[in-house]
Image (tube, helix red, strand yellow):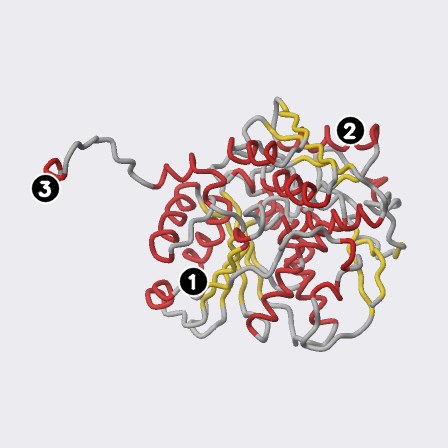
Amino acid sequence: MEFCYRCSLCGRAYSIQPKLNLCPDCTTRQQKDQPLHGVLEVELRGSVGPGFDVFDLLPVEKEYFPPAPVGGTPLWKPKNLREEFGFAQLYIKDDGANPTSSFKDRASFLVSAFARKSGIREITLASTGNAGSSMAGIGAAAGQAVTLFLPKTAPVAKLVQALQYGARVYRVDGNYDLAYDISLEYSQIKGGMNRNTAYNPMTIEGKKTVSLELFRQLGRAPDVVFVSVGDGCILAGVYKGFRDLQQLGLIPAVPKIIGVQAETSNALCRALQSGSFTVQPASTVADSICVDVPRNGVHALTQIKNHDGELTSVSDAEIIQAQARLSATTGLFTEPASAAAFAGFLKISPRLEPNATVVVLATGNGLKDSASAQLGIKMPERLITSVNDIL
């Protein structure tokens, strides 16, 4: 298999190099407070059979990956939900089962391998929490130094997780967008590899592995996939995996992807309707998808338009209700950003074909943000001293 970079805007091809992150031509037209211009994708050339190894479709050799069991996550068959909604082929892809309990391990895994192959030991990034703790954990397995910039609102559990893994963590007195800009400036001064979402082409490429796994687990591509959306990088990764499978002749078409945003952090939804990106301060209980400027917004919208995808938004109340409902009916406890995808399914399922194969992508474990989870349950306040107190 052969690999190169290709610009998602102008189509120009480049050889894969660790210091090349965005298209040199397109990035000169970058505007302030707008999504990244010139996002690069990894393009592959070659052929494989249906029994391919996922590593065969990645641009870094298997020997460079750290010893962490990333991927191969469970595909749940939620019996109660299937019966309730009449979808006999409803599945939940549980990426909270990754080593750091987050989908983001898929990107961190490939970034770590790329850094090792390139002889780079320090990796820097900004994160709302999951990408940071993910890179810290995967970096620990690889013996790499990780420098992380977190917004002050990042959940304590994710901060603690990153520190446990030994990352150097800086808390930013501002939002994720400020943390993102500071991390880029730090990388320009200190060097190393920057893992920022969409900025580093390997982040989208690593995230495509979920689509490859779904194909292998189902024996085909699903008809519909629901995915939570913040920056648009996971959305693009899901598309990239299915596009690769179609290019290789393994599936006839790319499935319908439905991206789900929080109503108060829905820059992509607004841009799809208006045709342009405008900045509105984002604030949502789903911290992992809370962004003012979706860095992969232009590229993600292009995928939605080219492949007949959809974007929808749900309220924080719907997200919290979906989180509790998913837990109580399946036993799968996901964080709010992950539950947003299920909230999208609850909203749109009435107009889906009941015989469709539908996958809800669950991206993170609920213990990542237990404080938010308390909004959907009633905590017991009364203390008892014997069984007689409740009889």
The three-letter amino acid code for the residue at tag 1 is: Ser
Label 2, label 1: how far apart the Cα atoms are: 45 Å
**How many labels were placed on the picture?**
3
Location of residue 186 in the rendering, given as x and y in whole percent from the top left corner: 78, 28
Label 2, label 3: how far apart the Cα atoms are: 61 Å
Q: Residues within 10 Å of mark 2 (few under 14, many from 20)?
A: some
Rendered residue at 29%/36% (across/down): 379
Q: Earlier in the sequence, mark 2 or mark 1?
A: 2
Callout 3 secondary element: loop
Q: Residues within 10 Å of mark 3 (few under 14, many from 20)?
A: few
The three-letter amino acid code for the residue at tag 3 is: Leu
Location of residue 290 in the rendering, given as x and y in whole percent from the top left corner: 56, 38
Q: Choose mark 3 or mark 1, whichever is in front.
A: 3
Numbered mark located on residue 391 in the image: 3
In the image, 140 versus 43, the foreground residue is 140
Res 151 → quadrant:
top right
Q: Are marks 2 and 1 in contact (CB under 8 Å)?
A: no
The residue carrying mark 1 is 349
The three-letter amino acid code for the residue at tag 2 is: Tyr
Rendered residue at 68%/50% (across/down): 107
In the image, 213 versus 315, the foreground residue is 213
Location of residue 185 in the rendering, given as x and y in whole percent from the top left corner: 78, 29
Q: Choose mark 2 or mark 1, whichever is in front.
A: 2
Outermost residue toward the top in this view: 173
119 horizontally vs 371: left or right: right
Location of residue 116 in the rendering, given as x and y in whole percent from the top left corner: 80, 47
Residue 102 versus residue 223 in the image, above or below: above
Callout 1 secondary element: helix
Res 205 → quadrant:
bottom right
The residue carrying mark 2 is 186
Label 3, label 1: how far apart the Cα atoms are: 42 Å
Q: Specify the quadrant that holds the N terminus.
A: bottom right
